[in-house]
Image: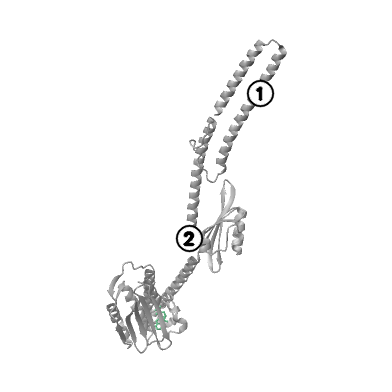
Amino acid sequence: MFKKIIALILVIVILAHAAIFITLFRIEDLSTTIISCVCIILLEIILVYLSLLLFTERIRVSINKLNRYIENLDDIPQLHIEVYKEEFEEFKKLIVSLDTMIDRYNKNTKNLRYEKRKADLILSYLEQGIIILDDLGLVKEINDFCITSLQLNIKIDDKIENLFSNSTFQKMLSTSIAQKQSKNCEITVNSQNLYIKIKPLIKNTDKYGYIMSIRDITDIRKFDEIKYQFVNNVTHELKTPLTSIKGFIETLQLGAINDKNAATRFLEIMDIEATRLYNLIEDILLLSDIEQTEVIMPEEFDLTALVTETISLLESQASKKGIPIIIKLDQINFKGEPDHFKQILINLISNSIKYTEKGHIEVLLKEKQNDIFLIVKDTGVGIAYAHQNRIFERFYRIDKSRSRQSGGTGLGLSIVKHLVATYNGDIRVNSALGKGSAFIIRFNTKKY
Ligand code: ADP
């Protein structure tokens, strides 16, 4: 269309020039010739002006059309040369270039969105709190763990220094910011032990924020404490018989070996202490073994037969003290490791024998709905209420000297408790001082 207009104008200009030149050749009057020339120039100026007007208008339309496409930057569709009707060759090239650019832009935006979603997902799965801060210390990103598990009172755009007023935390923040270095600290907030680390995010020497990680290490600290206590108790327990043995050896070396009676007595005591040492090590090993035990494929066995068999092993010990063991057993089969149940029975029944001077011991096995009860009762010294919860702790003994005299290690009941827990069972004690005790174990056949 535009080309046709240009061609038409050119034809008109050529025709006009031809007509004028023919007229000018015929007229000899100078003034007429000048007027004619001026007219020609004026006509040409008007024609050039009109052509330029048409041309610029056409360019303006094309540019506006392009602008309308580019303005909506959020969701740029491709222009598509075949859809976008453009006549200028240069504009056509521009559109193709724009299409390539838009295509690249769309792909990059899609990749960025994917990467952002991936980063968000990773942050939400982390088992620790992550907070991203800008260079002014304002919170810019918080992962779910901070809110759901750590229950931190924090939101986007909060100042990080308001998170904990704890002085250790405040000091760590200020030194990390001042020195542009990673720092960490451990603080206790609402009886939670938190390990906090802050690290500046630096790119090409430009500091543009910080990343802070927060871990709840309460369980680790509790475990450390238990481990410390255990090692302390074990060394103390081992030291006592060893000191005694060493003392007797020295006494013997200093001459007591020549006194036959004294030497025999000392050797007897040393034998008792060595046995105690051996039992202690055996029980410690057993306890650590149980702690790592997981009964993966339990097999069914005759629990009633196992109880009867274990009692027969301990009967001679009881009869030495003149204490009969009465048994009342239902026929029960159970799934598990028979040695575990044998250990439970040995520990409970031998305790009853140890702490009973007169009366009797009763062992009961019965099934009620989905529960199996294993009960060991005695008419012994009994346990005061204050001790009843603590006797299942490692090395806890009510009467240390009595327990030692009878070869006790203080680990028997904690071994029982662990074994019962392996089968999702529970153990409790009913006792009254001077009247006796009943240890009641319950296993739920549905739970295990
Ligand atoms: P120990 O080797 O000292 O017997 P246990 O862990 O088996 O260790 O028992 C812990 C403590 O519980 C014992 O020292 C004892 O004081 C108390 N105890 C356990 N069983 C009985 C019981 N049948 N009668 C009275 N006290 C008991």
User: What crowding class fits label 2: few (fewer than 14 Cα within 10 Å), some (14-19), or many (20 or more)?
Assistant: some
Residue identifier under label 1? 45
Residue shown at 33% from the left, 66% from the top: 296
Disc assigned to residue 8? none
Locate residue 157, reporting x and y percent.
60, 57
Camera-side residue of 358 and 150: 150
Q: Looking at the picture, which amino acid does disc 2 mark?
A: Glu
Locate residue 148, reporting x and y percent.
51, 63
Residue identifier under label 2? 127
Task: Give the side of residue 35 with respect to residue 132, left or right.
Answer: right
Q: Is residue 313 above or below residue 1?
A: below
Q: Quadrant of the C terminus?
A: bottom left
The local secondary structure at tag 2 comes to loop
Q: Which label's residue is closer to the chain start, 2 or 1?
A: 1
Locate residue 237, reporting x and y percent.
43, 75
Camera-side residue of 101 and 160: 101
Quadrant location, ligand no. 1: bottom left
The local secondary structure at tag 1 comes to helix
All told, the count of numbered labels is: 2
Residue 15, image quadrant: top right
In the image, the residue with mark 2 has its CB under 8 Å from the nearest atom of ligand 1 = no
User: What crowding class fits label 1: few (fewer than 14 Cα within 10 Å), some (14-19), or many (20 or more)?
Assistant: few
Of discs 2 and 1, which sits in the foreground?
A: 1
